[in-house]
Image: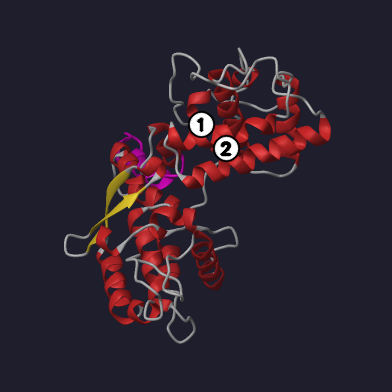
Amino acid sequence: MLSSLPESSHPAKHNMAKRKQPPAGSTFKGGDFQNPATWLPGFLHYLEAECGMSSNTISAYRRDLQKFFLWNTNHHKKTVHQVDITTLTEFLDFLQKSDLAGSSIARNLAAIRMFFRYLMLESVLTESTVDLISSPKLWQRLPKVLSPDMVNELLGSPVGSIDRYARRDKAILAVMYATGCRVSEVTGLKIADVNLEERYARCTGKGNKQRLVSLTPTAVDAIVTYLNLERPDMVANAVTDEGWMFVSRSGRRIGREAVWELVQRYAARTGCGADVSPHTLRHSFATHLLAGGADIRALQEMLGHASIRTTQIYTHVDHTRLKNVHQKCHPRG
């Protein structure tokens, strides 16, 4: 049996746009028993137009729902009116047996929950059984964090004699660790978003929300070197220079997948582990700041978390600071 947390503790939860009544002219009728996938296009449009979700989040919800629809077709072929707690529990067990991470299972459930709430808004359903199931507690496993020494090795691993775009790669790694930005936020940076003199950048996070993040001297130096010595040649053959900070060899905006690949390549070179990803640098950034005495509310703003609960997971990783405080303050420490 899956253990659970209150629904509000889920990191991927979004507030549904509230309607007092179903939209006028809705073509959905409570008596129509159809494949759940019938309502997917309308739901995705709702996420974009009314909830203001980013394209990356919408794509993740689409994939998760299509996984549920395919499983339902292969096992039960139930309509949205017939999906019950037993059906959902079996699907969650299926995900768990597929060795899916707890966070991924929780995200799948969040997508299904929002989908069924949308069906209630459209008067397809009068109630949702999904809300009776809370998110699995497994998603709260501690994130992987690199030590400061390992981060320094990773940031110094791009070498010009070996790596074709070593200056760009070094700048990307330095910016990710300096700011704690998500990979999509780093690839979405434009040159105009960065103020090197004042050492800050304006990034766009989930829900198209913007925030200012600080840059370290190391990150500024890496960016300056890349902009002066490497980027001009990379955009020379491009039709137009669209002003993206980090570009591919064709001079166009670098993709998230390319950043994942370069992080994993350098992580393997330095022996950081096969499970290191761009998000590992974000986790390390947050944990190291807490260990240095940063306030958790300030960290929440730096990371762009909507809820403090999402930020609080890093307090479980910060053993060093708590041990030092105990030794300093306890009478018998």
Circles 1 and 2, Cβ within 8 Å, touching? The answer is yes
- Residue 185 in sight here: yes
How far from the left and from the top, in percent, is residue 217?
A: 25, 66
Residue at label 1? 10
Q: Disc 1 vs disc 2: which is toward the camera?
A: 1
Quadrant placement of the C terminus:
top left
| 137 and 243: which is toward the camera | 243
Tag 1's secondary structure? loop
Q: How is the image coloured?
A: secondary structure
Q: Left or right: where does residue 137 sit relative to residue 228?
A: right
Residue at label 2? 139
How far from the left and from the top, in percent, is residue 90?
A: 76, 28
Q: Quadrant of residue 173?
A: bottom left
Identify the residue at horizontal 33%, vertical 58% (top origin): 178
Check disc 2: other Cα within 10 Å, few if <14, some if 14-19, many if 20+. some
**Of callouts 1 and 2, which one flags the residue occurring earlier in the amino acid sequence?**
1
How much space separates mark 1 and mark 2, taking CA atoms? Answer: 8 Å
Looking at the rendering, the stretch of residues picked out in magenta corresponds to 316-333
Tag 2's secondary structure? helix
Give the amino acid at mark 2: Trp
